[in-house]
Amino acid sequence: MSNKAAINRVLRKATGYELRKPAAAMPRRRRARGGDLTGDRLLVAPAFVMSTVRSGSTLLRLLLDSHSQIHSPHELHLRDLDVTVKTKYAVKALTEVQLDEEQLRFLLWDRLLHRELAAAGKQLLVNKTPNDVFIADEIARCWTDARFIYLLRHPGAIARSRQETRPQDSPERNAEMVLRYGKALEAARAAHPGIVVRYEDITVDPRKETQRICAFLEIPWEEAMLDYGRYDHGRMKPGLGDWKAKIKSGEVQAAEPPPALEEIHPSLHDLCAAWGYAPAAAAQPAT
């Protein structure tokens, strides 16, 4: 009988206990509670074009997408993609892996955009959908390394362009929608640093403006960006971005002169001044 066995025999008789080797330590969980969640994201430093509707964002998308390292897909409407956790058991299960509905939605967004980037075989994703201005805070929470490109256009020109595509809307309704996007864009600019570009400047000197954007994105500029008509950028149809003949021409064309201030709905005058398209003194109170 070994010494251990003899000792255990005496201990059992005297105390009811015996000596045993400690069990092996339990393996660590896949993720410690409160641990780093950065590994949840597949995309690295994605960029987002923040704009109103009818602001030239499709033109900017096509210029960027013509870069050999940048993929800028058609509008994907992240705002309208959501997830629902239906039962308390699912809530408990997700809680154990530190996920709630927002984080689950973020995983969906990230996976979708990464899928698009991987399919394009490029390195950097630049997303553009005008209604992204309403989820700028969520985007910044989803990707803490996200970068923002703020695209401005004369509000009067935006309203005129939107009225042409939606003649069924009254001028008041049209101005209301432009102002709604404009206010959301201003809120995003105030909360999240980024680069500001103007549609008018892009049409005048696309070389200079795309060079500025590439420098902001820390990626070399390419001459090919100026000839977006040479490349397949996917279908152009309503709901995916601009689809008019001007954008389908494949060439950057001059912007039309903006309407005179007196021709612009009074509710947009303050926005014209805020974006530098009208003197502040000339702006009228918003209605």
Image: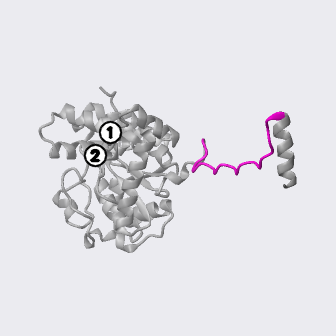
Q: CA distance from mark 1 to mark 2?
A: 7 Å
Toward the viewer: 16 or 64?
A: 16
For residue 80, the mark is none
* Span highlighted in magenta in the image: 15-33
For label 1, the residue is 181
248 or 282: which is nearer to us? 248
Residue at the (19%, 60%) spot, across then down: 246
Q: Is residue 46 magenta?
A: no
* Tag shown at residue 53: 2
* SS for callout 2: loop
* Local SS, label 1: helix
In percent of width and height, residue 121 lies at: 38, 69
User: Is residue 193 something that shows in the picture?
Assistant: yes
Q: Quadrant of the N terminus?
A: bottom right
Kind of residue at disc 2: Val
Coordinates of residue 17 in the picture (x, y in percent): 79, 38
> How far from the left and from the top, in percent, is residue 269?
32, 35
Q: Quadrant of the C terminus?
A: top left
Residues at badges 1 and 2 in contact (C-beta under 8 Å)?
A: yes
Name the residue type under label 1. Tyr
Name the colour scheme: one colour
